[in-house]
Amino acid sequence: AQSVTQLDSQVPVFEEAPVELRCNYSSSVSVYLFWYVQYPNQGLQLLLKYLSGSTLVKGINGFEAEFNKSQTSFHLRKPSVHISDTAEYFCAVSVPTGTASKLTFGTGTRLQVTL
Amino acid sequence: EPEVTQTPSHQVTQMGQEVILRCVPISNHLYFYWYRQILGQKVEFLVSFYNNEISEKSEIFDDQFSVERPDGSNFTLKIRSTKLEDSAMYFCASSEAVRSYEQYFGPGTRLTVT
């Protein structure tokens, strides 16, 4: 079975500062990795994904994440955050099966951006 | 841009009642999912559905739950004899055949059982 750990439940940061949201996963097989964002009262929106290839992946809204197989991590970064980035961020994994693959989520990190 | 829609946005029901949560997946998608998020907890997988049958279900998805695709557009989650602990946000998601790993989520239905 797979599991995802997001060590930080909340991350406060000032606007225009850099941020890193941490994600570690556990799996005995290769996985796909995802970051989703949930704005207040909205559904989950895919930020970025890692399937294979380059370990640095770029997503929407200026976010990027780096896959580190040896450390089983997939940390999310943004060099300069904006107030509008305030949201809940979820890291997730799935096992590529070629058919419907469930997502296993972490507990989420609330990013709070202030002036 | 196509999106997954869910109705109602908020459902209040009494314990023991049956509820049906409705979802309209993106039109060319073939894989459908339900997840739930109890307040303050993580998003949990309930069930996946493909070709008119359940592909996988979690331990949570017991006989109290059922899913159905009654026509070419809707995908429903039925919860029989609701319990207080069923109170949660329920998310529907869908994915296309070629990129089945990329799931698109609806805005959710908040179910409150009183």
Image (cartoon, rainbow, N blue to C red):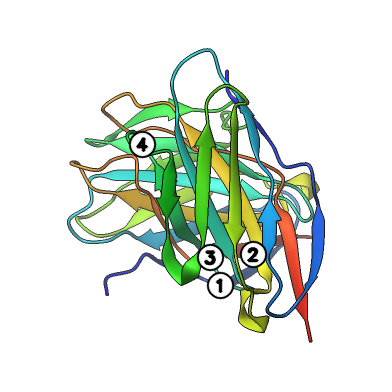
In-front residue for pair A112/B106: A112
Q: CA distance from mark 2 to mark 1?
A: 6 Å
Numbered disc 1: what chain?
Answer: B
Numbered disc 4: what chain?
Answer: A
In the picture of the structure, the residue carrying the numbered disc 2 is: B110
Numbered disc 3: what chain?
Answer: A
For disc 2, the neighbor class at 10 Å (few under 14, some 14 to 19, many from 20) is many
Q: Secondary structure at mark 4?
A: loop
For disc 4, the neighbor class at 10 Å (few under 14, some 14 to 19, many from 20) is some
Look at the picture and state if A25 lies above or below B65: above
Q: Which amino acid type is marked by label 1?
A: Ser
Q: Secondary structure at mark 3?
A: loop
In the picture of the structure, the residue carrying the numbered disc 4 is: A51
Look at the picture and state if B45 lies above or below A90: above
Q: Which amino acid type is marked by label 2?
A: Arg
Q: Are marks 1 and 4 on the same chain?
A: no
Q: Which mark is residue B41?
A: none
In the picture of the structure, the residue carrying the numbered disc 1 is: B9
Residue drawn at 76 percent across, 52 percent down: B15
Q: Which mark is residue A43?
A: 3
- The reply to whether the C-beta atoms of the residues labelled 2 and 1 are less than 8 Å apart is yes
Residue B112 x/y as whole percent:
72, 62
